[in-house]
Structures are given as C-alpha cells and as structure tokens.
Image (cartoon, rainbow, N blue to C red):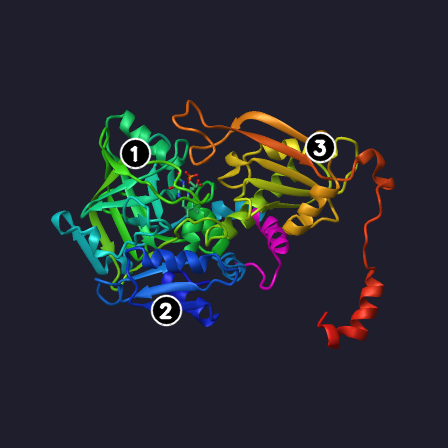
Amino acid sequence: MANDLRGWLAEVDEMGELYRIDGADWNEEIGALSMLNGGKRNAPALLFDNIKGYPSGYRVLSCATATSSRIAHLLGLSKGLTDLELVAELRKKLPTWRAEADKFPPKDVQSGPVFENVHSGNDVDLLEFPAPKWHEDDGGRYLGTAHATITRDPDSGDVNLGLYRMMLHDRDKVALFARPGTHGNLHVEKWHARGKPCPIAVSLGHHPLLSRMASTSVQNEYNFGGAIRGEPIEVIREEITGLPVPASSEIVLAGWIYPGETKMEGPFGEWLGYYAAEAAPAPFMKVERVYHRNNPVLLGAPPARPRSESTHYRVLMGSAILHSWLEESGVPDVKSVWMSEAGVRMMIIVSIKQRYAGHAKQVGMLVAGSRHGDSGSNMTKYVIVVDDDIDPSNIQDVMWALCTRTDPEQDIDVIRRTWSSSLDPMIPRPANGFFNSRAIIDACKPFEWMEKFPKEIAISPELAAKVKERWSDLLNL
Ligand SMILES: Cc1cc2nc3c(=O)[nH]c(=O)nc-3n(C[C@H](O)[C@H](O)[C@H](O)COP(=O)(O)O)c2cc1C
C-alpha cells in the first residue's frame, strides 16, 4: 500500500480510476463537477490542475474514495465484492485492527517532503492554495473538507485526529465547525479552561486513509491507520505546536486557537443535503506556519445530497460497526445490517432469522438506542427489521417487505425525544434542544403465524438454471 497521496494517485491511475481536469475554476466549478461526478456508482477520482488563477501544479483532488473498488483498495479488502460482502469482510477485519492498533504507534522521523516549502509569520498566505467554494450558497471557500485536524488533550496528552469543516477567512485564519462532544471541540475547551490557546495542526492533503481515520470515531487514529496498513504511519513533531503531523503530508498548517475569539463560519452545504444553519461565530485557527510540498495537492470532499462521494464509505463502515456491536450484545441470528445510503444513514435496516416472539422488536430497540454506527447514528429516524430472505441493501426488496409484511397500526412504534443534532432540517429554530423521534418498524412476517404466512412467488434455483440455459442467448438472462 502506498504511504502518501502521490503513491495512492499512481495506484488509482493504474486502476484506470483517475481523471485529470485542466482549467476548472475554484469558484463553484470544481464543487459542481465533484458533486455531479461523486453521485455516480463508478465515479472516478478527479484531479484538478491549472486551476483558474493558480500556478500549474497547485492541484485539488476530489471523489477520492467514492466507489467500492477504491474503498476496498484503501482498506486492503478483496476486490469485486457486493456491498454486503464488503460489510462482512470489514466485520472480520475490525477486531484484528482494533487488537493490533497498539502495535502500530506512529513512528517519529526527522524530515519529510512536506518541508520542501516552509512559510512563517508574515509569509503565511493561505490564499496560496486553490481552496474551492464548493456549493453556490456556501458562506465562503472551504480549505478543509477532507483534512485531518490534530490536537492534544491537555489532561491525558492523547493526540486526536478529527475532520471538522474549515472555512478560509484570510491569509492566516480559518474558522472551524467542530460539533459539541467531538474530541477536537473537547480539547479546545480544555485548553481554554486553563486560559491557554489550543495548539492545533492540520494536514490538508495525505493518503486518503488518514481522512477516513480522522472522520471515524476510533481511538488513536494514527495507530488504527497503522494497523490497517500493517506498518506505522510516519510523523514529524511540528516545531511550533509539538504535535505529530504526517511526514508525507502535502500541506500542513500549524498554529493556535485563542480563547474568547471567534470568526463567522458557514453556512455550508451539509451531508443531509441542506444548509442546516446560518453563519455563526466559531473558534478559528491563527496559522503561524505553513509547510508544503512542491506542487501540493489539496484533498477535498464536498458534502452533498446523497448519493455523494463521502456517503458510501460511511455506510459500509457504519454498517460493519453496528453489526459487530449487535452481535457482541448477545442478540442471536442477525444476518445483515445496512445503513441506507438513500436514507442518509437515518434509516437502518437489519435482517434477522426470527427465533422467538419479540426478537424483531428487541433488535429494533437496540439499533434505535445505539451509538455504534459511526458518527451519524445520533440522527437515526427509522429502524426497519426484515426477515433473512430480504437483502437490506436492496431498497426495492426492503420496500416490498415494508408494504407486504406490516400493518402500520400494529408494527410501527415511535420513541419520542431521542438524540439528534443541529443538522436535522426538521427541527425548528431557535431550538431548546435537538431532539427527534425514532420509528421502529417490524417488517418481518408476524412471528406467531409466520409458518402460515402466504407463500411468496419464487423461481426455484433448478427451474431458473434450466430456463437460463435454454433461453439466455435470446433474453440475455
Ligand atoms: C467529509 C466529512 C466532513 C465532516 N465534517 C464535520 C464537521 O464539519 N464538523 C463535525 O463536527 N464533524 C464532521 N464530520 C464528522 C467527524 O469527522 C466525525 O464525527 C469524527 O469521528 C470526529 O472525530 P472525533 O470523534 O475524534 O472527534 C465530518 C465527516 C466527514 C466524512
């Protein structure tokens, strides 16, 4: 596996999945192209060069991990698997990666290509990089959409990598939106409670695995990434902040978030497909130093109404994490779990082999109350439990079960005042708290008379094989 973005680009080029685009405008055009492309199942990665108003070589990469093939490549999974097979393989790998993470602490090195250019103090100019204005109604240009924000907990000394959107303000300032409860937000609060500025470093271009680690709730993201790679990630202790930054990064910013100072941030088009909130004051990073490679590549991933480049990875990972957690909870015979992409991960479908009265409802309640579906599980609205003959990743199958195996009056339960988020467009503002409700839908055949449930129309494998053999030439079966 390549250890930097350039190696990864060469591998993806070899796979025939990298398109180069010359001459696009950072102002809305890169964003529109990335969104139009990122919604396709076979979306290539897009490498923009000769960006309007920027020197040749200052590039932007988007749609990096939009497809199953590149996600499999990123995580070292088998090629050519279906979505549910990928989830199953991920479930097998997750415990090993977790168990081995301690063996792969980041490795300190003294130098790396990111030192090719170093700008300090008055020489810092973030406008040097072609940060896109991704969506037409965004409040500004966003330098950070697929970056890794590196902070340290002042109590424990633990280092965290997070991905919290980052809006460009001027030559040396970027505002950050890190939701309450995220590690980045907690770290900033802890430093400020001591009356001190929070040291912060940001990597803006790197092997896409690092973005994926930063945006997944795992502990010790560097270690976890190392376990996936099978070798430690190399880091350099950044001089000003002392934070470990990826040695192979394309661009690194280092600086401080000062207590009590804010800049306006947003609005920004978000992953649910809406501008969830107006511009609001937010903490900002004062950049003291910039390091970058020659001809740097800025990695980006604009959120969009699904299907978008970021959703597929999160669906696969979230489904695997949730399935493993259900199994660990002791509930039997869960066949598969799917956090629906069309349902923006607010709809989770679980297929089970019904074993006892109440089994389906038990699974539904566990999922509705879980926080184990990658970030976003706080926003679940619908949990649908189906029998094991239904493929939860096939929305056609799921809708068929929903309409033919439920009676709404009996099979839908609503739990009120559950955990949500400020991103939910259904919560009127101003809000005292961000609550939603959850519907648990038992779309399994009724347990007490499932043996007598009408027989569904099916074609036996023998008959299917027979007619296919005879008629395939004519009907392309
Ligand atoms: C493309 C992308 C953009 C994201 N943007 C934000 C954001 O702006 N703010 C935020 O709080 N979380 C955002 N997230 C989710 C966080 O990265 C995620 O919750 C992560 O687990 C946070 O790290 P932490 O658990 O170490 O705090 C984003 C995720 C992705 C994939």
Q: CA distance from mark 3 to mark 2?
A: 51 Å
Q: Which residue is mark 3?
A: 411
User: Residue 280, which numbered label?
Assistant: 1
Look at the image and tell me whether residue 350 can be seen.
Answer: yes
Residue interval drawn in magenta: 76-94
Distance from Cα at disc 3 to Cα at disc 1: 42 Å
Q: Secondary structure at mark 3?
A: helix
Q: Callout 3, which amino acid?
A: Asp
Is 298 drawn above or below residue 332 in the view shown? below
User: What's the CA distance linking mark 2 and mark 1?
Assistant: 36 Å
Q: Quadrant of the C terminus?
A: bottom right
Asked whether residue 157 appears in the rendered view, the answer is no
Q: Amino acid at mark 1?
A: Ala
Left or right, 330 with respect to 4, comes to right
Q: Is residue 83 magenta?
A: yes
Q: Which residue lies at the image location 51% right of the left edge and 41% below the top edge?
A: 374
Mark 3 near mark 2, Cβ–Cβ under 8 Å? no
> Is 78 colored magenta in this rendering?
yes
| Crowd band around label 3 with a 10 angstrom C-alpha radius: few (<14), some (14–19), many (20+) | some
CB-based contact (under 8 Å), mark 2 and mark 1: no
Residue 458: image location, x then y, percent: 81, 56
Q: Nearer the viewer, mark 3 or mark 2?
A: 3
Which residue is outermost to the right?
Answer: 452
Residue 20's label in the rendered image is 2
Around disc 2, counting alpha carbons within 10 Å, would you say few (fewer than 14), some (14 to 19), or many (20 or more)? few
Element at label 1:
strand
Which tag, 3 or 1, sits closer to the chain's start?
1
Front-most of residues 261 and 155: 261
Q: How far from the left and from the top, in percent, is residue 156?
A: 37, 32
Q: Main secondary structure of the magenta part?
A: helix
Numbered circle sitting on residue 204: none
Q: Amino acid at mark 2?
A: Arg
